[in-house]
Structures are given as structure tokens and as C-alpha cells.
Image (cartoon, coloured by chain):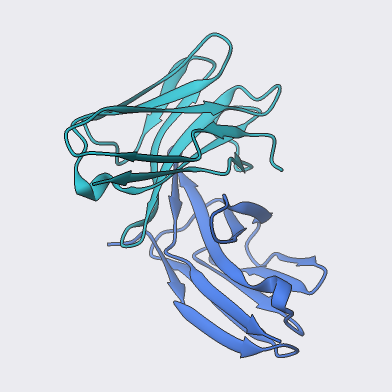
Amino acid sequence: DSGVTQTPKHLITATGQRVTLRCSPRSGDLSVYWYQQSLDQGLQFLIHYYNGEERAKGNILERFSAQQFPDLHSELNLSSLELGDSALYFCASSVVSGTDTQYFGPGTRLTVL
Amino acid sequence: TQLLEQSPQFLSIQEGENLTVYCNSSSVFSSLQWYRQEPGEGPVLLVTVVTGGEVKKLKRLTFQFGDARKDSSLHITAAQPGDTGLYLCSLKNFNKFYFGSGTKLNVKP
């Protein structure tokens, strides 16, 4: 158990819908990272937040957005969902910004039908 | 184009055999991490290597960082079924993190 929690574990929805994935980092960790893992693309870095501020953006679509709240939990919002958005979404946390050591949560499996 | 290339993509071996998997980049990087991921779970960090030529050992796993800091290898001695999983290498570049596509290892009892 990494100490990072993600909810929900599974999510099934339809094309065009909007969903919110939630992540609670390890106690004391200020950085949160979001990743998408699909069969054909591997693990892709989406976005990094540190203490409520966006620090780096990766291959995140404009339909996707994220934020980190004052209590340090983070949410990833996915809208206008397409079939190709079906994937595992992972959250990771670390103590400081940009450190190489990240602790991954168990992931949310999103299925878009 | 992938920043990190891993090989082989798949590896199926018998318990007790040795194996090596590779991670290569076209760019020099300051550090590299190796992770292991089991089905349905998040990646778990195994090691971080930072110095060219560095060798780190974790029980039966030996990690090596190339002298030019563009490649790395993971060697497993006497593989066990518990080593089965997806082995990923990762590097940080300008505060963004990149992962290779991984080597899927299956160790048969």
C-alpha cells in the first residue's frame, strides 16, 4: 500500500459524458501527478501540481483539466469523453516538487462505451 | 518517437533463469528510475540511478546506468514467479516524467 488513494476504482460511462477522478496523496506529500495508461500508448504523464499550483503539463488534452485543493487532494476532470479515453488513470504523489521518487495510487479504470 | 525505448517488449522464461532488460534514450538524462507494475496496480519504484556507470543491487536485481547516461539495464538473477510483472523505466526532463513502454516479464514455475 503506497498510501495514495484513488476513487473510484472503476468507472463506466458513455461517450460525451463528463467524469471526475479523485486522488488523495500520501500524508505530508505536496506534489500530485496524473498519468494515463492505455494499451497502445503506455504510461503518459498528464499534469503535475505542487501545493495547489500547476507545475508542469504533459500530454493532457484540452477536454481534460485538473486541480489540487487546499487539503492537497486532487481531481482530474474528463469531459466530452470519447472511446479512446478508456484507460487506467493513475495518480502519484511525492514530498517535494519534481523529485524523482513518486508513489503511485492503485488507479481508476475508466471505460467509455 | 518515444523518448525511452525498452527491450525486449516481452520475455517469458523458466524459474531459475537469468535475464536482462534494457532501457535506452537518445538524450542524456540526469537520473533514471526503474519501476515494477503488476496487473491492475500502480507502478512501484525499485531504484533511482543518477551517476554514469552506477551499479545498484536490490537482492537478485542489479541495475546499471550507462557511462554516457543514455542507457540502463536491469539484470535479474535466478528469476522467480514473483518477479512476474511489467518493468518500466522512467526519466524526468524539465519537470515532466517520461516512461518507456515496458518489458512484460513472465516467469514460469
- What residue is rendered at 58% in x and 52% in y? B43
- Side of A28 where B33 appears, left or right: left
Decide which of A92, A53 is in the foreground and name it: A92
- Quadrant housing the N terminus of chain A: top right
Q: Residue B63, position in %: x, y?
A: 68, 68
The chain displayed blue equals B
Residue B108: where, in percent of width, then height? 65, 86
Which quadrant of the structure image shows residue A99? top right
Residue located at (45% from left, 16% from top): A53
Q: Residue A9: horizontal and vertical position, in percent?
A: 50, 40
Q: Nearer the viewer, residue B12 or A94?
A: B12
Vertical comparison of B50 with A104: above or below: below
Q: Is residue B91 visible?
A: yes
Q: Is residue B103 above or below residue A64?
A: below
Q: Position of residue B21 (x, y in %)?
A: 56, 77
Is B75 drawn above or below residue B53 in the view shown?
A: below
**Residue located at (54% from left, 20% from top):** A73
- B22 vs B96, left or right, is right
The residue sitting at the right extreme is B59
Indicate the chain coloured cyan by its letter: A
Q: Is residue B90 left or right of residue B74?
A: left
Q: Quadrant of residue B2?
A: bottom left
Q: Residue at x 64, y 42 (%)?
A: A101
